[in-house]
Image (cartoon, rainbow, N blue to C red):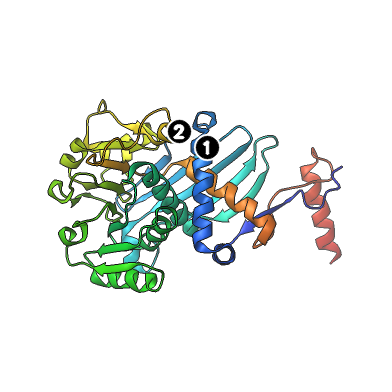
Amino acid sequence: MNTDPKLNVVPFVSVDHMMKLVLKVGIDRFLTELAATIEEDFRRWPVFDKTPRVASHSEEGVIELMPTSDGTLYGFKYVNGHPKNTRDGRQTVTAFGVLSDVGNGYPMLLTEMTILTALRTAATSAVAAKYLARPNSRTMAIIGNGAQSEFQARAFKSLLGIDRLRLFDIDASATRKCAQNLAGLGFTIEECRSVEEAVEGADIITTVTADKQYATILSDNHVGPGAHINAVGGDCPGKTELSKDILLRSDIFVEYPPQTRIEGEIQQLPAEHPVIELWQVMTGETEGRKSADQITLFDSVGFAIEDFSALRYVREKLAEHGMFVELDLLADPDEPRDLYGMLLRCEKKLNAA
């Protein structure tokens, strides 16, 4: 008989809890520590189960499951991507995630991951740039000033010291929103009227647009020698942001090639086109940036190990800060083989009430 009253409850981090947790830790500290956790897991990349995410595509968007395990813990994220949602007052991307104990299969954490995904995407981008951008990069252009843009800016400032932002969006109100949200945080911000104006003099170019289409947000003539491109928005089949000519001039770094070749910018290239896995740069197995004139491209689509890192980090923070409720999620009969008996006991209580 189980006598542990907590065995059937699972910590649940709501959206409200997540916001308060991030603010208690501090946004910059949260991003920095999360980035360190992601880097730690990338350095042990070979121990993880890896598979392209399981995707259900429609004309309106995509719903995906992103699973992985390091043999001790198992994590997965449910996430959607529906660009039209903003017209209806909904988020383009929403998500939740679960972290479980491989030894017994019991979930150890259930959490919102809409906010957490924005944080982990920004942290991963900044970690990649730490290895790929020119040293002492200070200026970043952000093309697409929607839900991800402020997180990207905060992460790049926290990890790389980026303090000059050049913002552009086809919707000028999005640019104003981004600039206002980042005011007073130590950035010099310029609201630009075109992509050309935004990328002029930028050390790092981040593209983070939402439309599900083959698009050319960044043309070949926009990218000069030495730039680092952080391509975040192209993350599903049929959705790209960069001119193919940029790809042919760049050294391309990816998370997991079998997934990126389906979903990333490199879906425009032949399957045999060489790419470099980011984890190999972090472990020193291969070089990242080799020269000041080299164009580096992080073709970011998001991979399950990053979500695993985020789940692991949040669970560790709960011990210090709380910010969760306990869900009665798991059946816990007195005798493990007598699941039906739980119903009978419940029936007796209902009848006695």
Question: What amino acid type is highlighted by mark number 1?
Answer: Thr
Q: Quadrant of residue 255?
A: top left
Question: What amino acid type is highlighted by mark number 2?
Answer: Thr
Q: Is residue 276 above or below residue 146?
A: above
* Residue 34 appears left or right of 6: left
Name the residue tied to disc 2: 51
Marks 2/1 in contact by CB < 8 Å: the verdict is yes
- Mark 1: secondary structure: strand
Circle 2 residues within 10 Å: few <14, some 14–19, many ≥20 = some
Note whether residue 96 is visible.
no
* Residue 48 appears left or right of 59: right
Q: Quadrant of the C terminus?
A: bottom right
Q: Position of residue 100 (x, y in %)?
A: 63, 42
Note whether residue 31 is visible.
yes
Q: Position of residue 247 (x, y in %)?
A: 21, 39
State the residue lying farthest toward the top: 272
Instruction: Look at 41% across and 69% down and name the residue there.
Output: 185
Circle 1 residues within 10 Å: few <14, some 14–19, many ≥20 = many
Q: Closest to the observer: 206 or 162? A: 162
- Mark 2: secondary structure: loop
Q: Quadrant of residue 54?
A: top left
State the residue lying farthest toward the left: 221
- Give the CA distance from mark 2 to mark 1: 8 Å
Name the residue tied to disc 1: 68
The mark that comes first in sequence, 2 or 1, is 2
Q: Position of residue 267 (x, y in %)?
A: 26, 37
Q: Which mark is residue 170?
A: none
Q: Is residue 162 above or below residue 127?
A: below
Q: Closest to the observer: 237 or 129? A: 129
Instruction: Look at 28% across and 28% down and name the residue there.
Output: 274
Q: Position of residue 141 (x, y in %)?
A: 27, 58
Instruction: Look at 32% across and 71% down and name the residue there.
Output: 179
